[in-house]
């Protein structure tokens, strides 16, 4: 073998080795998803938000403990008698404001934050592709929603055990179940609450694709949330109430019945899926047609 042939073979081997080391589309996708999760949970504001959410059950529990009041309406009225209900009460109190605000911040910043920093242009030309980029953003939002609700669940459980007696759970239907059964139902409530936030997350993702200013995206998303709330408070248009974003949110309480009432829960999940599908598709259309220089 001549020296020239040997050199050619070496060059060919180097090229083949570089090709073998080149990340595949699947590896690009995994790396992209991991990068998005790191981006969301690597921010200090995300951990501050989770700390605030964790503080809600502690604040409620301490207030009830110091007041010494027992009994009352709703889940809060049952906390002093059974610390288990601090978990459910905290989720119920966080759903109308704290959790939507947290989702608004994270969703509004998802694409607009990248655009404001100038990194979106590079990401749009990356091998992972625009569709996978949007999917990674959405998955990160889903993970955040679940993490946020489970943070309240865990904090409520710890605070409930420390501050109050804990025992068997009397459900809304009057049936008494074990604490383990009750905690499993409360865990299901946390997951249902997280899924109930996905429609708002989809709206935030779409709004974030329209602007390069994160604050504007957050404000617009929260504004849409307020509009839904106002529409839901007008009795003259009650025909459209079942189709509003937050109408089915209270259905999580139906898990505390024996047997659970699934109709309202399923309807709420279908409404959230519809909002998510519409606004995710709108965000996809916007992102895939977006000028790289825009």
Image (spheres, grey):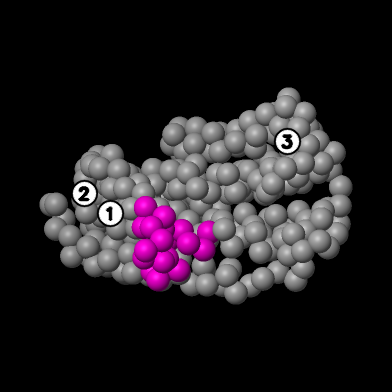
Any magenta on residue 246? yes
- SS class, disc 2: loop
Within-10-Å neighbours for mark 3: few <14, some 14–19, many 20+: many
Eyeballing the image, is 275 above or below 209? below
Q: Which of the 4 image quadrants contains residue 71? A: top right
Labels 2 and 1 touching (C-beta < 8 A): yes
User: Magenta segment, which residues?
Assistant: 230-249
Alpha-carbon distance for marks 2 and 3?
A: 41 Å
Disc sitting over residue 207 in the figure: 1
- SS class, disc 1: helix
Location of residue 35 in the rendering, given as x and y in whole percent from the top left corner: 42, 49
Q: Which residue is mark 3?
A: 159
Looking at the image, the residue that sits furthest to the front is: 236
Disc sitting over residue 230 in the figure: none
Q: Which of the 4 image quadrants contains residue 69? A: top right
Disc sitting over residue 211 in the figure: 2
Q: Which of the 4 image quadrants contains residue 212? A: top left
Alpha-carbon distance for marks 2 and 1?
A: 7 Å
Eyeballing the image, is 260 above or below 22? below
Instruction: Please report whichever mark, 1 or 3, sits nearer to the chain's N-terminal start.
Output: 3
């Amino acid at each position: 073998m001549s020296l020239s042939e040997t050199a050619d073979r070496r060059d060919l081997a180097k090229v083949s080795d570089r090709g073998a080391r080149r990340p595949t589309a699947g590896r690009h996708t995994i790396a992209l998803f991991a990068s998005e999760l790191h981006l969301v949970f690597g921010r200090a504001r995300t951990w501050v938000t989770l700390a605030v959410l964790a503080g809600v059950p502690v604040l409620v529990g301490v207030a009830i403990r110091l007041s010494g009041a027992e009994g009352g309406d709703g889940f809060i009225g049952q906390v002093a008698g059974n610390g288990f209900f601090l978990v459910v009460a905290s989720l119920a109190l966080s759903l109308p404001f704290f959790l939507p605000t947290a989702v608004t911040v994270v969703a509004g910043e998802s694409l607009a934050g990248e655009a404001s920093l100038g990194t979106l242009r590079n990401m749009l030309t990356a091998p992972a592709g625009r569709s996978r980029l949007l999917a990674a953003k959405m998955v990160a939002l889903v993970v955040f929603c679940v993490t946020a609700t489970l943070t309240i669940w865990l904090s409520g459980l710890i605070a409930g055990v420390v501050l109050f007696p804990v025992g068997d759970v009397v459900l809304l239907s009057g049936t008494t179940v074990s604490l383990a059964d009750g905690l499993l139902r409360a865990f299901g409530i946390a997951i249902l609450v997280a899924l109930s936030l996905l429609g708002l997350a989809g709206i935030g993702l779409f709004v974030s694709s329209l602007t390069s200013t994160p604050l504007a995206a957050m404000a617009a998303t929260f504004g849409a949330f307020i509009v839904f709330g106002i529409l839901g408070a007008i009795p003259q248009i009650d025909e459209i109430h079942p189709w509003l974003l937050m109408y089915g949110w209270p259905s999580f309480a139906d898990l505390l019945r024996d047997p659970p009432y699934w109709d309202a829960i399923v309807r709420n999940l279908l409404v959230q899926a519809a909002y998510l599908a519409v606004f995710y598709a709108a965000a996809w259309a916007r992102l895939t047609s977006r000028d790289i220089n825009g």
